[in-house]
Image (cartoon, helix red, strand yellow):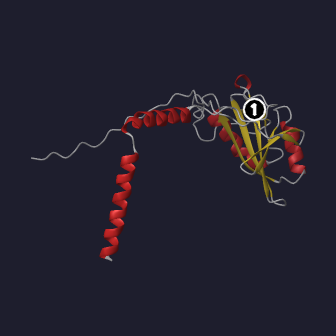
Amino acid sequence: MAGDDVTETETETDAEAENAENLDAGDAPEQVEAFEEAADRSDEPPEQADVETGVLYDCSSSHSRGHRVIHPTREQWLDVATQLLADGWNMCVDVTAVDYSAYAADRNLPASVTPERYEVVVSFLSHARRERLRARIQVPADDARIDSLHTLYPGTDFLEREVYDLMGIAFDGHPDLSRILMPETWEGHPLRKDYAVGAIPVQFKAPAQTS
């Protein structure tokens, strides 16, 4: 109703006026400074957090987003993967990798794990348990290689080739470790953080001439 609208408008106006009276103009610079300090802090990388850890499949373990995560060394990797398959982790869902050379924030690693530039991340699924498990394996930049899972999980064939192609991590024991997305003659690995960002000039059609 019109009368209700007027009453509501007047109430809002009175509240705004009261807020304006309570606001000291001298406080404005302090409020701006506080907001700026908060914004600066939000840009800073978080401190290394304590990660709740344990031992699973003879290697360090942690939790992330409701899933268990194991952190085997490269030397342990093939033995651990063999244990996983025998223990019912019958499906390897994904094999990927991360280049952390340009990443300064917390990596959520157990204290017993030494971070390296590269990290191979492998996701497993157990249909019987209806659970997922993730493995994170540290790979040093000066020896970017790790054992292949192909003999245990043949479906990792193309996944490992993609990691090799784009990240340059070799998988020892893979039957055909060759590029899968880039041409065989391509130099470098495009997903590495130090890979140069290129550009292709685009020639647009000239606008129509008007008399």
The quarter of the displayed image where residue 172 is located: top right
Name the one closer to the observer, 168 or 62: 62
Q: Tell me: residue 123, above or below residue 3.
A: above
On the rendered structure, is 120 left or right of 87? Answer: left
78 to 188, vertically: above or below? below
Q: Find residue 121 and report its horizontal and vertical position in percent.
A: 72, 41
* Residue 37 location (% of width, % of height): 51, 32
Hey, which residue is sitting farthest bottom in the picture?
1
Within the image, what quadrant is residue 90 found in?
bottom right
Mark 1 packing: few (<14 Cα in 10 Å), some, or many (20+)?
Answer: many
Residue lying at the far top of the rendered structure? 142
Name which residue lies at 74% across and 30% down.
Answer: 139
Describe the element under mark 1 as helix, strand or loop: strand
Q: Is residue 5 found left or right of 160 in the rendered image? A: left
Q: How many marks?
A: 1
The residue type indicated by label 1 comes to Gln
What x and y, as percent, mark residue 166?
62, 36
Q: Tell me the residue at 41%/33% (across/down).
A: 29
Residue 60 % position (x, y): 84, 38
Question: Closer to the camera, 17 or 139?
Answer: 17
Locate residue 62 relative to residue 28 in the image: left or right: right
Question: Which of these two is toward me, 21 or 203?
Answer: 21
Residue at the (55%, 33%) spot, across then down: 41
The N terminus lies in quadrant: bottom left
Residue bearing mark 1: 138
